[in-house]
């Protein structure tokens, strides 16, 4: 008999309602685990899935992870997780997404929405990384899949920075889609803003340390941070996941792999493969060749398989092993909240489909002191920029002296420029060393250079006034050997200067000792019901597949080499 | 290096570090580069005009047939004076490193 736990999963019951012809037409390489299983085409949908699940069902060893208490009472069933992309809002190919939903039948769709990479402006300005329409576009198919099939959804670091406001905004997007389509969801939210007073107290107690190569913290940094966020680990998610009626979790700032790791640990996966999978899947299809978007991870207690959903992509042992180099300080030690993942003994095995990779063997070493990473930003002022090109070889040859002249003239008119932290003028010389600056080994100007002038000032008006003065100086200052007296600076844009808004810097990027007992309690949570459940009482979603989904069934064999650009054109 | 490596790239590793990766697609090439010892601290310090203390990690990673070097970001990420917000165009000096046979 089919066993169904509290995470259990109505696929077998439902798949007999699906058109059999579609199953029969699956190409061999697209069958789940075809590398191990026969790949013979099913005569009956029901018997096919029953057989597969029977093969997989086995008595689990007791999980070794103290976090996975919820799994200790039930058998371990293989399950899969789908991620549509490494960043919610960046778009993903719908054909691959629906193929993954229909044929891999994920227990959860998990997608990271956050990053510090775009810079401190996200936290500072309150802007989201992607536009509302991008979030709505990406959420709409996901919510259809979740509503139709009862798949759990976890969205982390809402809006890019994971502020409380962006968690609410993301829930608002989900509400909007749900109301439009008649879905109902029970949504849990987890918040990650930290009271600066708590940080000050911890700092006084010596419990805050620079993360990676950040400078030492000061009280000034704490007092002047626009707000402070802490990256949550798995624990707040695990607490929410205890309630099986929660359909969706939207969280504030999280360690990127945390929702992936937490969901798997909740389901009884050992911490090492759970975290290792999370580290790879949080980047979507970046571990595939060519790099892609939609990925499925098939989880077992001590290993996992990665399969890209675009038929032209494949994972190889090297492509997966190499992923842990990506944007990490070192590839063999991945520190996170609660412990460090050691990858020295990880193995990567190509499966028989020649496009999936099985990963096992990493080791999770719990930390003696549970730490969370803090993020905070300081506002520096307002920026106005201008750009222009120089083609005159005499001026290019003497460009450093010329820009010194411009700088002196500006500083005479505005004495605070380059003498005050909040007022500055800088030049980037494209065609020489604008990209690498002090790192450039060959700072040699070409026959044409572009100059980006960057002005910082305490107000936007002041920044624009200084930029206007500096840009005019670039146009009209004289220089040694000058023979072109009409002007020096080819301006491509009008207006000639562009106000660029508020500017911030990362002022807090530090690890705070909190102890494991606070790993849950410092992140407040809230439960909301959305959609029709708001007025009628929550019905746990319209989770029975009734064949009325408006989404057309995919002709899987006809997917072909759908690339990203054709997806964009088609959608 | 351009002709023997499969991937040569750079990226932020958080807001305060830049990291360089070189990946090879076969064991023989990887072994050749390891043996040649051209990807040492001296090479990177010279190419990127770094001091010893700027280099956080410089290592080979055998499971991925890869080499990695992480160093302290010389300018603030995403702030005034930023040149490369994501840090993805700092790899070019690696392309011309000569790898002995």
Image: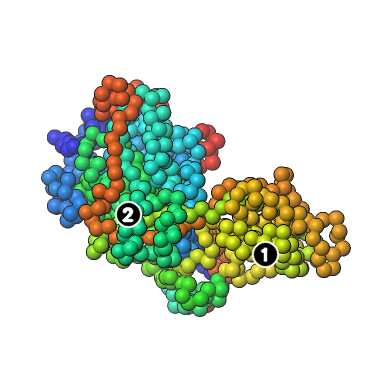
Observer able to see residue A362: no
Question: Is A271 displayed left or right of A319 in the figure?
Answer: left
- Residue visible at 64% across and 60% down in the picture: A416
- Marks 1/2: CA–CA distance: 47 Å
Nearest the eye: A363 or A472: A472
Mark found first going from the N terminus, 1 or 2? 2
Question: Is A418 displayed left or right of A534 in the figure?
Answer: right
Percent coordinates x, y for residue A216 in the rendering? 41, 66
Residue A432 is marked as 1
Nearest the eye: A187 or A356: A187
Q: Secondary structure at mark 1?
A: loop
- Residue visible at 72% across and 65% down in the picture: A408
Nearest the eye: A541 or A81: A541
- Tell me the subunit letter for badge 2: A
- State which quadrant residue A26 falls in: top left
Nearest the eye: A52 or A161: A161
Q: Which residue is mark 2?
A: A198
């Amino acid at each position: 008999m089919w066993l169904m736990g509290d995470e259990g999963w109505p696929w077998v019951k439902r798949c007999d309602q699906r058109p059999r012809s579609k199953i029969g037409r699956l190409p061999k390489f697209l069958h789940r685990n075809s590398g191990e299983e026969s790949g013979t085409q099913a005569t009956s949908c029901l018997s096919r899935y029953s057989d597969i699940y029977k093969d997989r069902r086995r008595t689990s060893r007791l999980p070794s992870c103290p976090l996975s208490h919820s799994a200790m009472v039930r058998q371990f069933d293989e399950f899969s997780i789908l991620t549509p992309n490494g960043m919610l809002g960046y778009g993903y190919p719908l054909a691959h997404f629906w193929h993954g939903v229909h044929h891999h039948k994920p227990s959860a769709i998990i997608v990271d929405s956050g990053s510090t990479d775009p810079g401190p402006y996200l936290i500072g300005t309150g802007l989201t990384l992607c536009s509302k329409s991008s979030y709505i576009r990406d959420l709409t198919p996901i919510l259809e899949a979740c509503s139709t099939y009862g798949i759990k959804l976890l969205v982390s670091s809402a809006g890019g920075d994971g502020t409380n406001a962006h968690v609410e905004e993301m829930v608002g997007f989900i509400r909007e889609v749900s109301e439009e389509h008649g879905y109902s969801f029970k949504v849990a939210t987890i918040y990650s803003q930290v009271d600066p007073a708590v940080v000050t107290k911890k700092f006084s107690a010596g419990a805050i340390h620079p993360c990676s190569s950040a400078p030492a913290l000061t009280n000034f940094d704490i007092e002047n941070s626009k707000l402070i966020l802490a990256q949550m680990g798995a624990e707040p998610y695990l607490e929410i996941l205890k309630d099986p009626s929660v359909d969706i979790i939207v969280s504030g700032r999280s360690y990127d792999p945390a929702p992936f790791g937490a969901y798997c640990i909740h389901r009884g996966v050992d911490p090492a493969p759970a975290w290792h999978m999370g580290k790879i899947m949080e980047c979507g299809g970046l571990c595939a060749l060519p790099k892609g978007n939609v990925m499925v991870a098939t989880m077992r207690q001590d290993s996992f398989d990665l399969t890209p959903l675009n038929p032209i992509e494949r994972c190889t042992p090297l492509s997966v092993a190499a992923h842990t180099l990506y944007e990490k300080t070192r590839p063999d030690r991945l520190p996170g909240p609660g412990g460090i993942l050691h990858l020295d003994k990880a193995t990567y095995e190509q499966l028989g489909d020649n496009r999936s990779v099985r990963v096992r063997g990493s080791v999770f070493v719990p930390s003696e002191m549970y730490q969370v990473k803090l993020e905070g930003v300081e506002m520096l002022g307002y920026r106005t920029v201008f750009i222009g090109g120089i083609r005159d070889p005499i001026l290019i040859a003497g460009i450093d002296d010329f820009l010194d002249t411009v700088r002196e003239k500006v500083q005479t008119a505005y004495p605070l420029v380059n003498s005050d932290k909040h007022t500055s003028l800088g030049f980037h010389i494209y065609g020489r060393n604008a990209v690498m600056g002090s790192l450039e080994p060959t700072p040699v100007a070409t026959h044409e250079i572009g100059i980006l002038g960057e002005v910082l000032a305490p107000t936007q008006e002041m920044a624009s006034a200084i930029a206007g003065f500096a840009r005019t100086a670039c146009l009209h200052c004289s220089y040694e050997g000058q023979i072109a007296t009409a002007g020096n600076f080819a301006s491509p844009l009008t207006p000639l200067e562009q106000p660029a808004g508020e500017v911030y810097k990362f002022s807090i990027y530090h690890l705070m000792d909190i102890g494991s007992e606070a790993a849950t309690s410092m992140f407040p949570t809230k439960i909301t019901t959305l959609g029709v459940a708001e007025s009628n009482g929550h019905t746990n979603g319209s989770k029975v597949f009734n064949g009325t989904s408006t989404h057309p069934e995919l002709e899987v064999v006809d997917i072909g080499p759908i690339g990203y650009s054709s997806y964009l054109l088609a959608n | 290096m351009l002709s023997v490596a499969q991937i040569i790239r750079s990226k932020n590793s958080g807001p305060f570090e830049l990291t360089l990766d070189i990946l090879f697609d076969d064991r023989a090439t990887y072994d050749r580069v390891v043996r040649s010892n051209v990807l040492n601290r001296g090479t990177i310090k010279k190419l990127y005009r770094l001091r010893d203390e700027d280099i956080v990690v410089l290592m080979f990673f055998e499971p991925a047939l890869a080499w990695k070097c992480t160093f302290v970001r010389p300018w603030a990420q995403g702030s005034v004076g930023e040149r490369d917000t994501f840090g993805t165009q700092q790899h070019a000096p690696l392309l011309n490193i000569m790898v002995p046979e």
